[in-house]
Image (tube, rainbow, N blue to C red):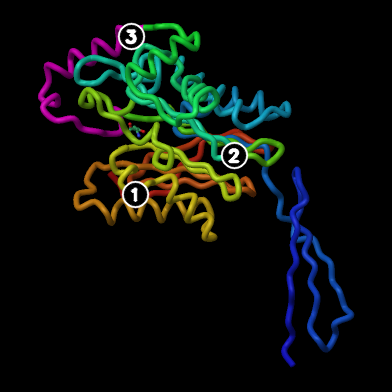
Amino acid sequence: MSRRKFLKTSALGVGGILLAKCVSGAEDKNIVEEKVVAKTTNKPIVISTWNHGLAANNTAWEILSTGGNALDAVEAGVRVTESDAKNRSVGLGGNPDREGKVTLDACIMNHENECGAVAFLQDIEHPISVARKVMEDTPHVMLVGKGAYDFAIEKGFEHKDLLTPEAKADWIKWKESEAQKKPEINSENHDTIGMLAMDADGNISGSCTTSGWAYKLHGRVGDSPIIGAGLFVDNEVGGACATGMGEAVIRIAGSATVVELMRQGRSPKEACKEAVERIIKKHKDIKGLQVGFLAINKNGEVGGHSVYAGFNYAQKDNATEEMKDAAYEMEW
Ligand code: ASP
């Protein structure tokens, strides 16, 4: 009779290990081996898109490393980027649309599938915090435009002009250039921050915030405030976020797709790669169309993948503080 093995595993909490019990088959069923498989859960941990993720992660880490929760961490983390006037793709100092208006998109999601979002929001420095208020103080998921602005003011947020002199000067230059005839996305004119964190309790939350595609049509909304596109979290499985051309991400329900692929057993890396392959398959013309996905699973394993080279992400946990280059399908 061939030897059969049954594996019974159980996870053991913070920094836990997986204990494997190997029970052999009928001929020697009294022999029970117990061995340590040494599978650790990497938590707390925070990851976020692009170089601006380093500073954002540091703020999130102050919360995570002192026993705070993932939701507070992902809100506080991306607020750093929203306030960075030098960053031209998020919040204050973000590039405006074709009309010279800075319009912001953001969303946030916690470990209980609660979520909030704002889109086409103007003159408010922290769209992520308004998104959280939508989640916590209203029965809705998304507010847009003037309604989102009025709600923010009612909640005590301050009106602030977000168009910096530098961003305005570039917009004027762009208006006088050939490029203004067609809105184009490239590696210089976008870069959302998407952040995913798992706290010491093993709960995952995510946030995503952007000024979107520079010089977009007035009224355009990208993937970043759309739950399931720019961000998705399912605390049973993991979380994912996206950056790059939002229209392409929306077409494949990008972040929800990555999470569902992880649910089916893919690693974060494999799931992000498969979502990128789907983007490539579903677009007749992929030239210059950059999209990157970033994901984390319940073990604290992390992965990213993009259509073109150049997408990177910041990771911070007990062992690591670094930028990592994501794998990709094509060179520019
Ligand atoms: N995904 C964002 C948008 O389409 C832009 C970006 O991440 O580069 O608005």
The reply to whether callout 2 and callout 3 are in contact (CB within 8 Å) is no
The region drawn magenta spans: 161-189
SS at mark 1 in the image: loop
The part of the image, by quadrant, that contains residue 114 is top right
Residue at the (39%, 22%) spot, across then down: 90
Q: Position of residue 23 (x, y in %)?
A: 80, 75
Mark nearer the N terminus (1 vs 2): 2
As drawn, the label of residue 112 is 2
Above or below, 129 against 198 in this view is above
Rendered-image quadrant of the N terminus: bottom right
**Type of amino acid under label 2:** Glu
SS at mark 3 in the image: loop
129 on left or right of 18: left
As drawn, the label of residue 164 is 3
SS at mark 2 in the image: loop
Q: Position of residue 190 (x, y in %)?
A: 32, 29
Mark nearer the N terminus (2 vs 3): 2
